[in-house]
Amino acid sequence: MRIAISADGRDLEARVGDKFGLSQYLVIVDLETMAFEAVPNPGASGQRGTGIQAVVLAISKNVNAVLTGYMSQTAKRHLSANGIEVLTGICGTVAEVLEKYKKGDLQKHMGVVSKPESRGAKIDKVALVHALRNSANQFANLLPILVGVVLLIGIFNAFVSKELISSIFSGNTALDSLWGACLGSILAGNPINSYIIGGELLEYGVSLFAVTALIIAWVTVGLVQLPAEIAALGRRFALTRNAISFILSIAIAIITVVVLNLIKG
């Protein structure tokens, strides 16, 4: 029987790695002969897809079980689908873990803590830290967007007057939709910004036709990115796609608002 253990070193005295996908090595051990080899983990660099790389490595080594500190559910599913037993929450040295596994202590321990809805179950500290770290990263990625939204509202209120808006959007359904689509095609940035501008326009009395066309065009038409799109996909395709998207943004906006009004009525 062959066991793969994520480890921070190349021998049996190395500590078991906290994360399967990021551990420096996978120590592959034959339980019958106790012969082992330390294989460098291709996912140790921390780039995307680290867990899957480690999964592929374990499968290619024909192991029967994988022991580690923490492993994502996706990696577990792939290993289990290939008939490989997975035990997580493991700590200690590779030698200690192997001895416990041979005695069956690890399997019994995992059986106790993995019972569903067990009030006395212990919290997996590695999984908790991993979850908290992911939450912190998501918040850090979202923070610039939130700051941008606040600044955008301030800039819009400071530099765009109600008189200017009234001179552009007259209340005519077709013209308002056209101007909304034009505005959405020119402006660029995160799609969330279109909701902020759309909300401010509604506060100024602009019709829902114009706001809906603006949001649709903002997402589907990109005149600012047009040169890059032409370079990547070709002039004919880029111009045709943007033209069709512009026309559809007006049509979809009118249809959407009409249907919404019918539902309300």
Image (cartoon, rainbow, N blue to C red):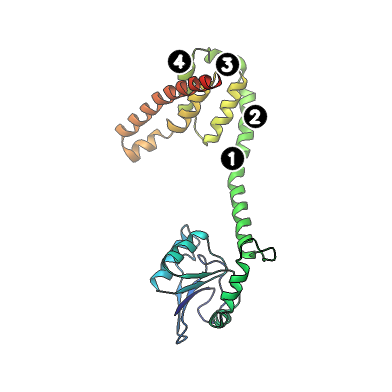
Of the residues under marks 4 and 1, which one precedes in the sequence?
A: 1
The tally of labels here is: 4
Measure how far apart labels 4 and 1 are at the Cα level: 32 Å
* Mark in front: 1 vs 2: 1
**Residue plotted at (52% across, 65% down):** 22
Q: CA distance from mark 4 to mark 2?
A: 30 Å
Q: Are marks 2 and 3 in contact (CB under 8 Å)?
A: no
Amino acid of disc 2: Gly
In the depicted structure, whether residue 100 falls above or below residue 253: below
Residue appearing at x 48%, y 15% in the figure = 173
Alpha carbon separation for disc pair 2 and 3: 17 Å
Report how far apart the C-alphas of labels 4 and 3 lie in the structure: 19 Å
Disc on res. 164:
3
Residue on which the image places disc 4: 174
> Which badge, 4 or 3, is on the more N-terminal residue?
3
Q: Do the residues bearing badges 4 and 2 touch, measured as CB atoms within 8 Å?
A: no
Residue sitting at x 48%, y 27%: 184
How far apart are labels 1 and 3 at the CA level? 27 Å
Contact, CB < 8 Å: mark 4 with mark 3?
Answer: no
Q: Secondary structure at mark 4?
A: helix
Asked which secondary structure carries label 2, the reply is helix
Does residue 144 appear left or right of residue 36 in this picture? right
Q: What amino acid is found at the position of numbered circle 1 in the picture? A: Ile
Q: Residues within 10 Å of mark 4 (few under 14, many from 20)?
A: some
> Mark on residue 145?
1
Name above or below for residue 166 compared with residue 6.
above
